Image: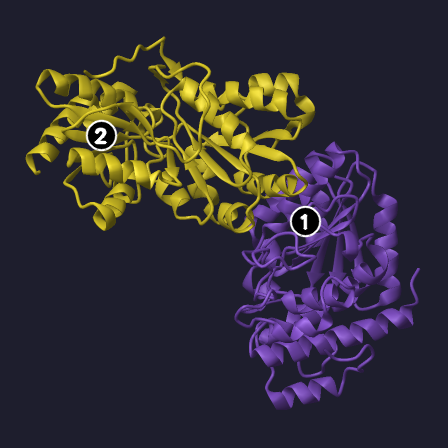
Chain colours: A yellow, B purple
Amino acid sequence: MAKKYIDSGKKDTRSGFGAGLYEAGKKDPRVVAMTADLIGSVKMDAFVKDFPERFVQCGIAEANMVGAAAGIALTGKIPFIGSFAEFVTGRVYDQIRQEVAYGHTNVKIASSHAGITLGEDGATHQTMEDIALMRALPGMVVINPCDFNQTKAATIAAAEYEGPVYLRFGRPAVPNFTAEDQKFEIGKAICMNEGTDVTIFATGHLVWEAINAAEALEAEGVSAEVIDIATIKPLDEEAVIASAKKTGAVVCAEEHNTCGGLGELIAGVLAANAPTPIEFINGADRFGQSGTPAELMKVYGLDAAHIVEAAKKAVARK
Amino acid sequence: MANINELQRISSQLRRDIVRMVTKAKSGHPGGSMSSADFLTALYFDVMKHDPATWTRSGKDQDVFILSAGHLTPIYYSLLARTGYFPVAELATFRQFGSRLQGHPSIAKGLPGVFQPSGSLGQGLSLAAGIAVAKKMDKENNKVYVMMGDGECEEGQIWEAAMFAAHHKLDNLIGMVDWNGQQIDGRVDEVGGVGDLEAKYKAFGWEVIVADGHDFEEILKAYAKADELSGNDKPIMILFKSDMGHGVDFMAGTCAWHGKAPSAEQCEKALAQLEETLGDF
């Protein structure tokens, strides 16, 4: 039987970040928040109000923010730099590469409004390439939590972890279904639902879509295992290989470009260790466009219905 | 104030180190290393409060120097070795496989004295500003120094950082520009047009000091003036007017030696013009 998950009420994952940042800041005076003119958008309001002496407003100048964060980190503090995903990845890739990754400074990149479900703003703001960019940097931890509660827990874990972290979350309100006071373990895949016929590896809010897909598949007699890949790097390879060997068919689901995302990552691991038929759910190699998150999820093939079809295809290829 | 003759003697040795390191490595950047050698000698041997014995990357309770123009490792490594961060003999490993003395500064192999990697230009002022912010948060009185090239000031991030430092009143931050007027493709005024740096930094809200980067009396006065101006809510920029390749006649005043190693014969000619004062590595 597929495990039932209850949505306790839709919430945006960026607010999960805000809640986690506040808690981490309350617990540890070394935590510093920085943004480039986006306090409200990245939900730093509570932190700014209660810890103004540990907040650094950087203005619309993200490259400088990355360098300044590295400087602040060198002194032993734990800076979180928050902005839209595009502006803390592609716009400042070289700064992150030199100052954060190669310098191995303790900077946490808080990347909001990631993916196509940013919605109405359109393609300039809908980053679908960020996971690929950040994955390619040696020593960078890449976390993409699935809901409000997990994002809050992941933020606290990122503060406690020593080293560069890329933390990805989004703008729209999405189902909040994981445990409220969970402990987030970096690098650990989370089995949401055990199954025997096919494994759906999902990341971000597509985990909810995967859970719904598993429910629909069960009604059709297909037993789907759902694994939440909340940490994309380092990947929990052991869990991925074990599940693929068990079910013999795989679907990878992510809100990202096909290039360099979770799908390619898992395909590489399985090709080397346990060759398995794989189907891919992602935004393909194209830019986004304006629309509501729900419209875009459907048109770009990211919702539960598309995952169901992909799972059936993967099973048929066994 | 330090003995000027002594500083001159040190900088002569540093220039020998630069020429010998680059010749041995058959690559590297002697031109800017020689134009910045005098004012950096004064900084490391006289002005800056630093202690190699207790140094850490945190820069805690010490003055910090960030080399933004990361290609100037010949002068940087010579300064660090000659002030006791690591053995002078290690200068012989510059740019060789396995060496801590990477082509551009790196922290990967743990070279003492190096805070951060640099080499991709235009980033050091932001880094230094961040350290200055943190020192203020910690109510620490030490200063943060950072050196850029004048060509490097063509990078947009420099001006983001200039705005940020003034906005946050980072009066513990002292920037320096090695204003030698040269960059890889030619004269700065022909290639990138960085223009009037004095007026530009002033317009960005900085205190600006202009000094002759090869006259130790002026150099020390400039640092003293910077010290006097610190604490006045404004960051301070010292523009050191200098000559690329200064100290060796055939290397001076041209961009040709930005990133070129002398031949063995040229090396001998150069060394004949630079007195050995502290013993070669």
Q: Please state which of residues B209 and B122 is positioned toward the viewer in this rendering.
A: B122
Q: Residue at x 42, y 37 (%)?
A: A142
Quarter of the image where one finds residue B269: bottom right
Q: Position of residue B183 (x, y in %)?
A: 59, 66
Q: Do dots 1 and 2 share one subunit? A: no
Q: Are marks 1 and 2 in contact (CB under 8 Å)?
A: no
Please state which amino acid type lies under the numbered disc 2. Answer: Ile
Q: Chain of mark 1?
A: B
Q: Which residue is mark 1?
A: B57
Where residue B69 sits: x, y (%)? Answer: 62, 59
Locate residue A224 relative to residue B120 in the image: left or right.
left
Q: Amino acid at mark 1?
A: Arg
Which residue is drawn at the image coordinates 29% and 22% (left, top)? A192
The residue positioned farthest toward the left in the image shown: A316
Q: Nearer the viewer, residue B195 or B9?
A: B9
Q: Is residue B2 above or below residue A64?
A: below
- With B243 as the anchor, is B97 left or right in this view? left
The residue at 20%/31% (across/down) is A199
With respect to residue A2, does B92 lie above or below? Answer: below
Q: Give the numbered dot on residue A200.
A: 2
